[in-house]
Amino acid sequence: MAISDPVARGSFIGVATALILLGLRHFQTRRRHAQVTQTDTNQRALSNKSHVAQTATKIRRTAPKSEKNQTIIGLTVGASAVALLFAAPVSAQEAAGTSEADMAGMDMSHSMTGALGNYAMTREASGTSWQPDITEHAGFEFMRGSWMVMFHGLLNGVYDQQNGPRGDTKRFASGMFMIMAERPAGADATLQLRAMLSPEPLMGPRGYPLLQATGETADGKTPLVDRQHPHDLFMELSASYSHRFSLDDSAFVYVGLPGEPAFGPPAFMHRLSIMDSPEAPISHHWLDSTHISFGVVTAGFIHDVWKIEASAYNAREPDQHRYNIEPGTLDSTAVRLSWNPTANWSLQTSWANEISPEQLQPGIHQRKASASAILTVPIANLGWWSTTAAWGRRTSEGVDLDAWVLESALKTDRDWTIFSRAEQIQNNELIALATGRSSVFSVAKVSVGAIHDWRLSPHLNFGLGGLYAFSFVPGALAAAYGSDPTGAMAFVRLKLH
């Protein structure tokens, strides 16, 4: 997609405006932090965040300049990012209630450096994507010789009910299990191996009911509509090698079969702002469906809080056989620029050119673009608030299809998490035609949910949660969907942390 396109130009300008304001806010925050002493537990909590920001994120004093004639769409994306700026970082008073033991665990996770660069390990998310440095550490680790080994996983048991003429019900299991092993590879290099598995093939090739969701196939003949496809058993089998040239500079190579190319924000099941929800976003195939690509090679360079990377990958979506590995030609490309201006923020913009991404229409190619901003703020009693605003575009056969997403989660304390998501997409696959495409319809969805966790052991939680979703369809789809149908999920969860 050319930058001359008005929607894309407006989106990038809007985000650029947010980045300028971010810089101003960062200097104010640093001034406030410098006045805080370190004499009690609450001040040590603030000192920990300041340490992360000083050692892993130093803001630059330049930002893209604004332009005139921004489009409404671009302003919407930029405004979402600007609105998030007004959430203040956690204060020493808000940190009251954080225990010495909990702070020790936080200090340990944030003191570990990343596999790809000299920054907090918590910055690294799915594939080679970034998230805010202050993000809660999800795994537990131990040393085995020169290897640091980390485990992380969750298993959901879900009852799903989608209402209306196109609705359905289903019980299914979802989740993932990840193991990572990392070791030094010389004085200035790091080797990391990572594997991630999913139980979702057990739900069957048709996946689970999800109104307005489209993408992939259950039988190799017809597309899935109003259903979310299951993810493959092997979600990631990857290796990365990084070399540090200085305190701020490093280069890396990442290979995966499957793996995740340099496109979009972190995959939805890894974003702190929505990972507690068992419901996939209907915008999945606009923003992060490439997180399972059967063949990826990514090379990148990191300078302080900036990262530029490019991928060659196999963009063909997984077929209906969910237990195998499907290598293919690395004929698609992606480029992503990431910026973490402070410990609380992570922003990215990316572009991709995909060759034959869809199994059922192999002759159609696709261009994609995305921009996103993630803000995470710690709050009192081991809590946090995390929000993601994202825009994505798919272009094929001269048709542009856009998606907008705003999602947020609030962890009020150790036990309760509340989450929500609002999204709108332009979709031409909701009404199947002989051509495989329908008219373009703009549909939207809002979901709200919560989960309560009980700690069973130091590394295992049991949770009970639920969500309710509202779908919004245009009048042309009312006969097919009914009048703004709804859906709900109830679920139990085991979480390894």
Image (cartoon, helix red, strand yellow):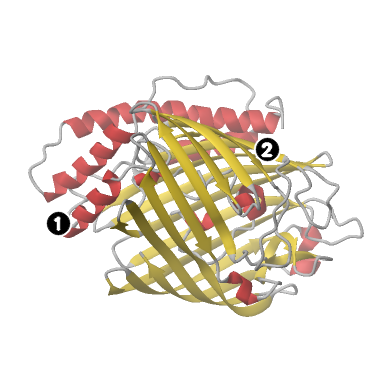
CA gap, disc 2 and disc 1 = 47 Å
x then y, percent, for residue 201: 63, 71
Please identify the quadrant where the N terminus is shown: top right
Of the image marks 2 and 1, the number of the one nearer the N terminus: 1
Image disc number at residue 138: none
Q: Residues within 10 Å of mark 2 (few under 14, many from 20)?
A: many
Residue annotated with mark 1: 100
Mark 2 belongs to which amino acid? Thr
Mark 1 belongs to which amino acid? Glu
Q: Is residue 214 visible?
A: yes
At x 55% / y 56%, what residue is drawn?
A: 236
In the picture, residue 335 is in which quadrant?
A: top right
Front disc: 2 or 1:
2
At x 49% / y 73%, what residue is drawn?
A: 156
Please identify the quadrant where the C terminus is shown: bottom left
In the picture, residue 213 is in which quadrant?
A: bottom right
Q: Nearer the viewer, residue 186 or 14?
A: 186
Q: Is residue 36 above or below residue 359?
A: above
x then y, percent, for residue 182: 39, 50
x then y, percent, for residue 358: 77, 53
Image disc number at residue 333: 2
